Amino acid sequence: MAGQVAIQMDHVASIDIAGDSSFVMGLEAQRRGYKLWHYGPENLSYVAGRVLARAQEMVLRREVGNHFTLADETTIDLADVDVVLMRQDPPFDMSYISATHLLELVHPRTLVVNHPGEVRNAPEKLFMLKYPQLLAPTMISRDAQAIREFRDEHQDIIVKPLFGNGGAGVFHIAPGDENLNSLLEMFAGINREPLMVQRYLPEVRAGDKRIILIDGVAAGGTNRVPPAGEARSNMHVGGRAEKTRLTRREQEICETIGPDLKARGLIFVGIDVIGGYLTEINVTSPTGLQEVNAFDDVCLESDIWDAIETRL
């Protein structure tokens, strides 16, 4: 199928082609004959009823140090392209939310992946609250007294920003740690957003599993093991990816949330599971395709594009 795909992403020069999911999604679209356009959310505009992007035609290659070519900038009307991949990284702030509103004006005539309105309604750490039976003890609050009471009950806790990403700002407050009050004061001085507080799951030492769902169905996963002395297993802070198979409990989690994801037009989703508990549902710019591909000898980006093309 020939057509046009616009990828709204952080600049292509900054990506690691060995692990970036947007890169392989773009390569697969290119293999299928689509013309690629590259632009950042800062280049998105609404003018006289049209949603425009100041974009550059892009060609991708799996060549380290020479993985892309960008043509001169031109303004494109997103109503004229077939698919927009919304792939810029969080934080999920008002800039991100504004972009979803603009892209919703062209969807579904131009298919936006994932559905921009549902992305807006499904921030990673809040969307999972729809499934309390799948969660470890969790609270969302900026009430310092309530957080201290939660800590008194569970002793060993994790505190993290509600709209952060990539493990940034995640703190493990172990029993006897005297830093909780200072930490809450620091967060209060940064913004007015609530925090997510969860009971610490020691099972994280054995790994934090990233599971990919495509159109609501589990397609594979990897186990991300944190380095020694680190509570976070994110790859960019030193986590190590391992081959894994989904447990029955993990399959049950996917089967519980999958139909809802599909109904909402959330085609490519990555969930995080620790010790049989759902800890995040990532819908904004999920990652993990290349790791699963390497371990399981599959091509998940092809499966994603099959799901996209059924909607075109």
Image: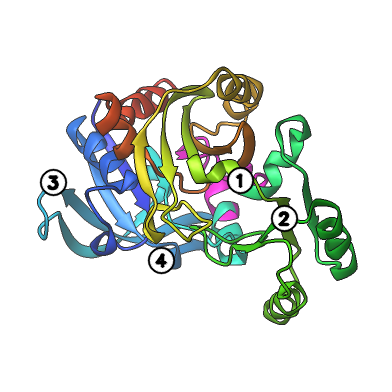
First of labels 1, 4 by sequence position: 4
Q: Which residue is mark 3?
A: 62
Tell me if I can see residue 92 in this picture.
yes
Q: Which residue is mark 2?
A: 156
- Residue flagged by tag 4: what amino acid is it? Asn
Q: Is residue 110 magenta?
A: yes
Labels 3, 1: front one? 1
Image height of 93 relative to 223, above or below: below
Q: Which mark is residue 202?
A: 1
Viewer-proximal residue, 261 or 59? 261
Real-space Cα distance between discs 3 and 4? 26 Å
Instruction: Assess whether mark 1 and mark 2 are in contact (beta carbons under 8 angstroms).
Output: yes
First of labels 2, 4 by sequence position: 4
What segment carries the magenta color?
101-123
What residue is shown at x 90% (from left), y 68% (from top)?
145
- Residue flagged by tag 2: what amino acid is it? Asp
Real-space Cα distance between discs 3 and 1? 38 Å
Real-space Cα distance between discs 2 and 1? 9 Å
Residue 215, percent from left and from top = 50, 25
Toward which corner of the image does residue 182 lie, by quadrant? bottom right
Instruction: Assess whether mark 2 and mark 3 are in contact (beta carbons under 8 angstroms).
Output: no
**SS for tag 3?**
loop
Q: Which residue is mark 4?
A: 43
**SS for tag 1?**
helix
